Amino acid sequence: MRIALIAHDEKKDDLVAFAGAHRDFLKACDLVATGTTGGRVAEAWPELTIRRLKSGPLGGDQQIGALIAEGKVDALIFFVDPLTPMPHDVDVKALMRLAIVYDIPMALNRATAEIILSGNETTARA
């Protein structure tokens, strides 16, 4: 499974904890992440192999969008901080639009990310 990981600054710790809780499953996945998020996850969980792209505001969101359009991402996990204004909010909306257009599962919080992975963990065991 090819999973893209992104988190706003105030949600990076949450995504790192989520990746740790699911690291056994994520070890078998092809992971791609925006630069800072990928770095934080890789530092905390070195057993995970993560392809790091640019930081979100520097084009990482757009790079992940391109991968979605090319059919190279199966699911998007994007821990969004709804309480902090984001100067690159239009990039975030464009990324979410691509996930909708290409009909890939998209989690914007931990509860939804848990559902996405639990469905795939069950499939992987079968």
Image (cartoon, helix red, strand yellow):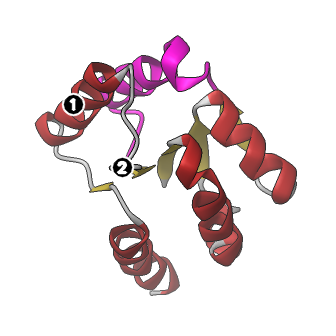
Q: Secondary structure at mark 2?
A: loop
For mark 1, does the 10 Å Cα neighbourhood hold few (<14), some (14 to 19), or many (20 or more) residues? some
- Taking the view exactly as shown, the residue that stands out farthest to the left is 101
In the image, residue 11 above or below residue 38: below
Range of residues picked out in magenta:
53-75
**Separation (CA) of disc 1 from disc 2:** 23 Å
Q: Secondary structure at mark 1?
A: helix
Q: Please tell me which of labels 1 and 2 falls first in the chain.
A: 2
- Left or right: where does residue 46 sit relative to residue 19? right
Q: Position of residue 112 (x, y in %)?
A: 33, 70
Q: Position of residue 111 (x, y in %)?
A: 37, 75
What residue type is disc 1 on? Answer: Leu
Answer whether residue 1 is magenta in the image: no
Answer whether residue 68 is magenta in the image: yes
Q: Which mark is residue 83?
A: 2
* Quarter of the image where one finds residue 113: bottom left
Labelled pair 1, 2 in contact (Cβ < 8 Å): no
Q: Position of residue 73 (x, y in %)?
A: 40, 40
- Taking the view exactly as shown, the residue that stands out farthest to the top is 58
Q: Residue at x 33, y 32 (%)?
A: 71
Residue toward you, 95 or 27:
95
What residue type is disc 2 on? Answer: Leu
| Quadrant into which the C terminus falls | bottom left
Q: Is residue 28 visible?
A: no
Q: Residue at x 58, y 37 (%)?
A: 33
Residue toward you, 29 or 45:
45
Q: Position of residue 55 (x, y in %)?
A: 60, 23
Q: Residue at x 38, y 63 (%)?
A: 109
Q: Can you identify the residue that label 1 sits on?
A: 98
Which marked residue is nearer to the observer: mark 1 or mark 2?
Answer: 2
Q: Residue at x 27, y 55 (%)?
A: 105
Residue toward you, 75 or 124:
75
